[in-house]
C-alpha cells in the first residue's frame, strides 16, 4: 500500500517591498522568517483576515515574525507583501 500524498504547497512569491525588507534581515531573522513562510505555503489560511481587504496577517509570537500576504483565488500562489522579523 502506498503512502497518502502530502498536501500540495502553494508557491510563495515576494513582491518588491518584501524583497527589500528581506535584504535588511540578519541570517537568524531570515531563518525564522523562512519557517513562517514554509508554514504559510502548507496552510495559507493560517493568518487572520485584514478587514476590508484581501490581505491576511500572520504573526508568529514564538519566532517573532510577521508576514502580510494574500492568496490567489485557487490558493496556488501566496504573495507576500510585507515581512518583519
Image (tube, rainbow, N blue to C red):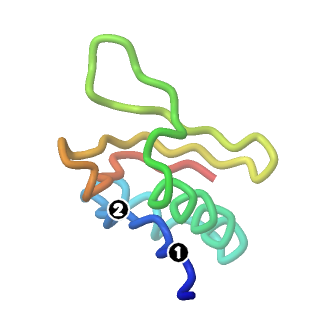
**Closer to the camera in the image, 73 or 53:** 73
Q: Secondary structure at mark 1?
A: loop
27 sits left or right of 74 in the view: right
Tag 2 residue: 10
Tag 1 residue: 4
27 sits left or right of 78 in the view: right
C-alpha separation, residue under disc 1 versus residue under disc 2: 18 Å
- Which percent across, then down, holds residue 11? 31, 66
Pointer 1 or 2: first along the chain: 1
- Which percent across, then down, holds residue 53? 27, 20
Residue 21 falls in which quadrant of the image? bottom left
The residue lying at 52 percent from left, 35 percent from top is 47
15 sits left or right of 5 in the view: left
Q: Residue furthest left?
A: 73
In the rendered view, tell whether residue 15 sits above or below residue 57: below
**10 Å crowding of disc 2: few (<14), some (14-19), many (20+):** many
Marks 1 and 2: which is nearer the front? 1
The residue lying at 37 percent from left, 55 percent from top is 18
Marks 1,2: beta carbons within 8 A: no
- Which percent across, then down, holds residue 12? 34, 64
The residue lying at 81 percent from left, 47 percent from top is 62
Amino acid at each position: 500500500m502506498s503512502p497518502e500524498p502530502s498536501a500540495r504547497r502553494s508557491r510563495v512569491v515576494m513582491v518588491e517591498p518584501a524583497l527589500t525588507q528581506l535584504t535588511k534581515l540578519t541570517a537568524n531573522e531570515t531563518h525564522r522568517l523562512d519557517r513562517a513562510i514554509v508554514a504559510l505555503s502548507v496552510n495559507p489560511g493560517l493568518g487572520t483576515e485584514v478587514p476590508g481587504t484581501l490581505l491576511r496577517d500572520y504573526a508568529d509570537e514564538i519566532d517573532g515574525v510577521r508576514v502580510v500576504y494574500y492568496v490567489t483565488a485557487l490558493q496556488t500562489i501566496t504573495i507576500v507583501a510585507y515581512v518583519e522579523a
